[in-house]
């Protein structure tokens, strides 16, 4: 890249915040509503964003956590994954979060006391966690710690929020215990759970606990055309660079509203333009030259990882699904997939459910299936031909 060019403003990393956070004003407004309700002494439903992988849920949660922290709240961001104890996750972010609390506030002192207790926030007691452990979390420990923080926050006119990503990674038993804690605290203290997960998360939570009508599930979808254009144009404009209309249209079409793909195609187009000299405008030729590079990264890092993580039974299911879709349809009936495999629907349901949990496919409506990532059907077709 020639010296003197502005830095590449696109961020195609998982969970990396884009320079222009567009198309999420409604979701951000809902989180702000939760904050204002709790600060005013009213209760508020917990807020859970649901959507496919790569649509920006993590970016959204991190933005919300930062905004709450900026308002004086204690709002640690936690990304759950199997095997990770939530007490360890809290301990890892507690000190950083405490640094942003208001000096002299009771909430600040309370967090400080917890940090000095054994060097971390042992909110679930010894051995308990919200990851893959078979042990139920220590309900009393978790409730006591969060209650003490929330009581201190109430005296300050503030609140506490657990901002939790990948909620579907929690086991049913542990998720039920977490919901129990949340429901107990929300009725009497300024406390909220703000989380995110895959589209099947609402039904998963319903299996884990009752009173889930106290959760607000907010769809987080792909970007509309206008929003996708803004996500590409605005970061470049901030660096004094424009996008040719044809180049912009091609990137938006290739990404299909998928925020990660937008960032990746735009990043590689910028890199290509920079190789030609001083960047003034991104042209169609830049995008065309960048497409093979971006597509190789998608195939290796997105498609390939998911396919290689599927077992042989799951791969056969994916092959049948793509074959039924052919070249036109983007949705099929789950019963049609079972018939193509010459099996009863009940026999293939565990495989279907496993693929849904992995985020490879999803059910836009009851009995209907679709691939969760743009272009993944075509990738499966190529793999089917290779293995055929």
Image (spheres, rainbow, N blue to C red):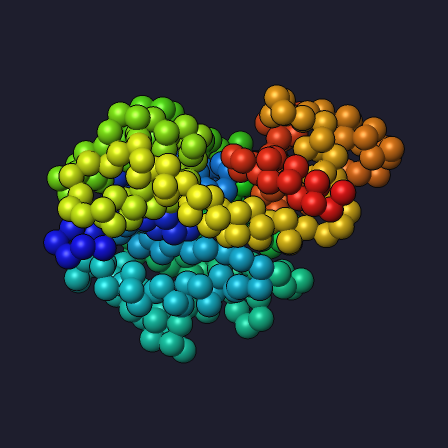
Question: What residue is rendered at 71% in x and 31% in y?
Answer: 323
Q: With 241 as the anchor, is 40 left or right in this view?
A: right
Q: Locate residue 120, reporting x and y percent.
A: 40, 72
Q: With 280 as the anchor, is 111 left or right in this view?
A: right
Note whether 379 is above or below 101 in the view shown: above
Q: Locate residue 214, reporting x and y percent.
A: 49, 34
Note whether 144 is above or below 349 in the view shown: below
Q: Is residue 294 visible?
A: yes
Question: What residue is rendered at 83% in x and 35% in y?
Answer: 341
Q: Is residue 263 visible?
A: no
Note whether 95 is above or below 220 in the view shown: below
Which quadrant of the figure has residue 190?
A: top left
Question: What residue is rendered at 21% in x and 39% in y?
Answer: 236
Which quadrant of the figure has residue 114?
A: bottom left
Note whether 36 is above or below 275 in the view shown: above
Question: What residue is rendered at 30% in x and 39% in y?
Answer: 286
Q: Quadrant of the N terminus?
A: bottom left
Q: Locate residue 139, reporting x and y percent.
A: 55, 58
Q: Locate residue 11, reporting x and y percent.
A: 32, 48
């Amino acid at each position: 890249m020639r010296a003197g060019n502005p830095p590449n403003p696109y961020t195609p990393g998982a969970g990396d915040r884009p320079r222009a956070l567009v198309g999420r004003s409604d979701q951000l407004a809902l989180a702000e509503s939760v904050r204002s309700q709790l600060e005013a002494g009213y209760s508020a439903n917990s807020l859970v964003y649901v959507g496919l992988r790569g649509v920006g849920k993590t970016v959204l949660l991190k933005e919300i956590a930062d905004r709450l922290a900026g308002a004086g709240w204690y709002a640690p961001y936690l990304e759950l994954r199997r095997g990770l104890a939530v007490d360890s996750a809290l301990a890892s972010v507690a000190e950083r979060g405490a640094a942003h609390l208001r000096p002299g506030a009771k909430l600040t002192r309370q967090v400080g006391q917890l940090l000095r207790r054994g060097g971390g926030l042992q909110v679930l007691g010894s051995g308990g966690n919200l990851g893959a452990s078979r042990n139920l979390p220590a309900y009393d420990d978790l409730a006591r710690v969060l209650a003490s923080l929330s009581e201190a926050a109430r005296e300050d006119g503030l609140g506490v929020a657990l901002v939790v990503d990948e909620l579907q990674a929690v086991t049913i038993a542990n998720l039920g215990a977490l919901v129990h804690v949340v429901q107990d605290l929300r009725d009497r203290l300024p406390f909220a759970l703000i989380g995110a997960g895959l589209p099947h998360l609402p039904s998963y939570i319903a299996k884990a606990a009752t009173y889930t009508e106290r959760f607000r599930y907010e769809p987080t979808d792909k970007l509309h055309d206008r929003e996708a254009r803004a996500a590409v144009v605005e970061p470049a404009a901030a660096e004094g660079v424009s996008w040719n209309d044809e180049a912009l249209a091609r990137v938006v079409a290739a990404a299909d509203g998928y925020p990660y793909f937008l960032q990746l195609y735009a990043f590689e187009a910028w890199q290509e333009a920079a190789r030609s000299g001083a960047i003034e405008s991104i042209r169609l030729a830049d995008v065309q030259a960048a497409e093979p590079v971006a597509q190789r990264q998608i195939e290796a890092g997105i498609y390939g990882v998911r396919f290689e993580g599927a077992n042989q039974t799951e791969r056969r299911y994916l092959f049948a699904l793509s074959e039924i879709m052919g070249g036109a349809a983007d949705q099929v009936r789950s019963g049609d997939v079972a018939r193509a495999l010459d099996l009863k629907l009940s026999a293939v349901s565990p495989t279907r459910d496993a693929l849904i949990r992995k985020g490879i496919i999803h059910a836009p409506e009851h009995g209907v299936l679709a691939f969760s990532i743009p272009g993944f059907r075509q990738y499966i077709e190529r793999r089917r031909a290779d293995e055929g």
